Structures are given as C-alpha cells and as structure tokens.
Amino acid sequence: MLILYEDGSHDLECVAKSIGDSLKGQNGEIVLKKASEVLIPDLLAASVYFMGAGNASPVGFGEIERIFRGIDLSGRRAGFFVSDLNGGAEYLKRIVRDTGLKVSKRVLSVSAKSCDDKRPEHDQKASRMAVESWAASIVE
C-alpha cells in the first residue's frame, strides 16, 4: 500500500500517518512518502494507493502526473484525502483518469484541525475512527 501526500502540507502529512497507523496489521507493506519522493518502483509495487492533495496545483506531484500518463494500474484501488474538495480531489481524479485505477467515490476531507492535539479527546477519537473506516473501505 502506498500513501503519498503533497509536499509541505503538515495537515496532509499528519493524516497520511494516521492512515498508515490505521492500516497496520493489514496484509502487505505500507509505504508513506511525500509526492516528490515517489518513484516508479513504488507505484508498481503497490496494489492500493492513498493520495493526498491540498489544491488544484499540489506541490511535488509533477513526476507522478507524468508517470500516470503512461502506466496501467488496472485492478488496483485508490482513495483520495484532500483539504480542498473542489481543487485537490478534482486534480487527483484528473491525473489518474487513464491509469485504470478503481477510485473510491468517498473522499476523505482533511481540515486544519484534523491533527490538532489540543482538541477534546472525543473529537480526536472520532477523527481516528473516521480515518480508519475510510481507509478500510479502500482496502476491502
């Protein structure tokens, strides 16, 4: 499983780590990387992808976008987590359009408060449960 997220976004990185934590115990390796660090072997090795973008021009996705123009990932699954539903989700949908990925219709919306440790414990627990539920729905 490959979890990749926009470079320089603390909120998306934090949620990416939460996704990784929620997937521990699942079959397969979990790889967590900034978008600019992702290589072709990373993309080919994964059967499930979690992609995080903040807007319509996410930092670090240039090489991934180029690779996705010529790669067949048919039969593999993907889920998006974004801080801007209109920009980030639409961007990710566009770059994977011709890859054959089966993309979940459920997009995880990330807020600036998603990883705020100062929130009440019940809010933090609800956020963790939402991430766990969403991630499990992609893997199944």
Image: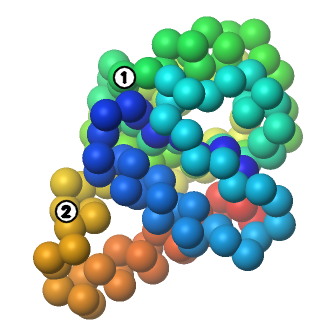
Residue at (41% x, 33% y) in the render: 6
Left or right: 99 as drawn, with respect to 111: right
Callout 2 amino acid: Lys
Residue sitting at the far front = 37
Tell me if residue 22 comes above or below residue 73 in the rendering. Answer: below
Given residues 42 and 104, the one toward you in this image is 42
Q: Residue 94: where, in percent of width, then height?
A: 52, 21
Using the rendered image of the protein, determine whether residue 87 is visible from the camera's viewpoint. no
* Residue 2's disc number: none
For label 2, the SS is loop
For label 1, the SS is loop
Q: Quadrant of residue 86?
A: top left
Q: Residue 71: where, in percent of width, then height?
A: 78, 17
Residue highlighted by disc 2: 113
Callout 1 amino acid: Val
Q: Residue 32: where, in percent of width, then height?
A: 58, 47
Counting the numbered discs, the total is: 2
Given residues 120 and 137, the one toward you in this image is 120
Given residues 5 and 89, the one toward you in this image is 5
Q: Residues within 10 Å of mark 2 (few under 14, many from 20)?
A: few
Q: Residues within 10 Å of mark 1 (few under 14, many from 20)?
A: some
Using the rendered image of the protein, determine whether residue 114 is visible from the camera's viewpoint. yes
Separation (CA) of disc 2 from disc 1: 21 Å
Left or right: 21 as drawn, with respect to 56: right
Q: Quadrant of residue 102?
A: top right
Residue highlighted by disc 1: 59
Quarter containing the C terminus: bottom right
Left or right: 7 as drawn, with respect to 137: left
Residue at (24% x, 55% y) in the render: 111
